[in-house]
Image (cartoon, rainbow, N blue to C red):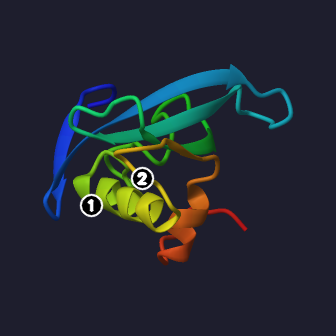
Amino acid sequence: MENKLRKLTIGEKKYLWRLQTSYRLNPSVPYTDYLALVEFRAWIDGRKQTPLTVRFHEPENPVTGTELTYHGIEPNLNRPAYARLLIEAGLAAGWKPEAEALVIDDGSEILARSGIDVGKP
């Protein structure tokens, strides 16, 4: 499902959203070769130039990938319920989808505030 545009309606607005994962070497963590940057992006249909971007910095498992996108583990950011949660958090943080973009660099804080265990202190 990664990189596929998905649709979600919240109130009267129709949003498009996607997840994208990129990797970089992580020599500081034993037995983990890479860190994954999972990026959630959402925008109002027709307003791609003012997206909400929420980033998650995660260790990458060579078998399952990142825990936030693996289909057997919760939370799974591929699910629309988490897309809604992130969009609503972006709106609460001041994102104006018709007018300006917003970048949230640590999305795990949003999940933690919602009572979702992301395995971080």
Say if 117 sits above or below 46 in the image: below
| Of the image marks 1 and 2, the number of the one nearer the N terminus | 1
Rendered residue at 26%/31% (across/down): 1
Q: Are marks 1 and 2 in contact (CB under 8 Å)?
A: no
**Residue 30: image location, x then y, percent:** 80, 36
Rendered residue at 49%/47% (across/down): 67
Q: From the viewer's side, name the closer residue of 117 and 7.
A: 7
* Residue 54 appears in the picture as rendered: no
**Residue 59: image location, x then y, percent:** 64, 39
Could you tell me how far apart the alpha carbons at marks 1 and 2 are, in whole angstroms?
21 Å
Q: Which residue is mark 2?
A: 96
Q: Secondary structure at mark 1?
A: helix
Q: From the viewer's side, name the closer residue of 97 and 27.
A: 97
Q: Which residue is mark 1?
A: 81
Rendered residue at 48%/31% (across/down): 63
**Residue 41: image location, x then y, percent:** 41, 38
Mark 1: amino acid: Ala
